[in-house]
Amino acid sequence: MHVNTPLKVHYYGSAVVLLGTRDEEGRPNVAPMSSAWWLGQSAMLGMGDRSQTARNMRAVRECTINLVPSALADAVDRLADLTATDPVPEAKAAKGYRFEADKFGAAGLTAQAGELVGAPRVAECPIQLECRITAVHPFGKGCSAFEAEILRSHVDESLLVPGTAYVDPLAWDPLVMKFCDYFGEARNLRESTLARNWRMPRGRLGRAA
């Protein structure tokens, strides 16, 4: 039986990404988020306006989107209550957040220079997207939606279907956020009609290097 309830969280199952940004002085920042979705060669990123990441993207108009494998869950969680905003906003301080200038170091992650943007990539992430912020839209109370144009994609070759520009879904195990907890090791339930219509090379899946 369905019941009416005002759900406090609407993370039904979203990929976790690490956003790499820099401020106007070139200081790097990295932050986890799971309010991201893609359409064509663009991504939409939802962020609270008071976050340092949002400020950086507004000011510098670029970022990197680093797709996180499930094996990096611990590193992501080390960033969960850190902020590069000093002083820490009151609402975040009430939730236990603390200031950290070197979030890469605190998480045990490695900053890797971008090729087309000044924002850092995350070396440990096997899929990295360099992006330009093309528009910012108000979204709800105190939040914004950032349109990010994907300029260049970097993919660990072990994830690629040999001889193609497709990621092998059997090789890629994303970290997923469901209702504020981390999940991984998703299993393939069945072949999809969408994959067939998009001419996914099904016969070569599972053969990534």
Image (cartoon, rainbow, N blue to C red):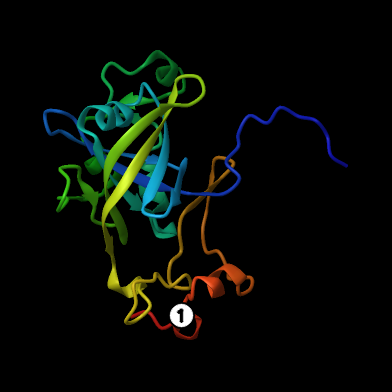
Residue at image mark 1: 201
Q: Is residue 53 left or right of residue 188?
A: left
* Three-letter residue code for mark 1: Pro
Taking depth in this image into account, of 97 and 7 the one nearest to the observer is: 7
Taking depth in this image into account, of 65 and 144 the one nearest to the observer is: 144
Position of residue 25 measured from the top left corner of the image (x, y, whole percent): 11, 28
Quarter residue 67 falls in: bottom left
Q: Is residue 87 left or right of residue 15?
A: left
Residue located farthest toward the bottom when viewing the structure as drawn: 203
Q: Is residue 106 above or below residue 205?
A: above
Residue located farthest toward the right when viewing the structure as drawn: 1
Position of residue 129 measured from the top left corner of the image (x, y, whole percent): 29, 53
Residue 79 seen in render: no
- Please tell me whether mark 1 sits on a helix, a strand or a loop: loop
Q: Badge 1 local density, few (<14 within 10 Å), some, or many (20+)? A: some
Residue at left offset 34%, top offset 33%: 135
Q: Is residue 167 left or right of residue 84?
A: right
Q: Is residue 174 above or below residue 32?
A: below
Quadrant placement of the C terminus: bottom left
Position of residue 83 measured from the top left corner of the image (x, y, whole percent): 32, 28
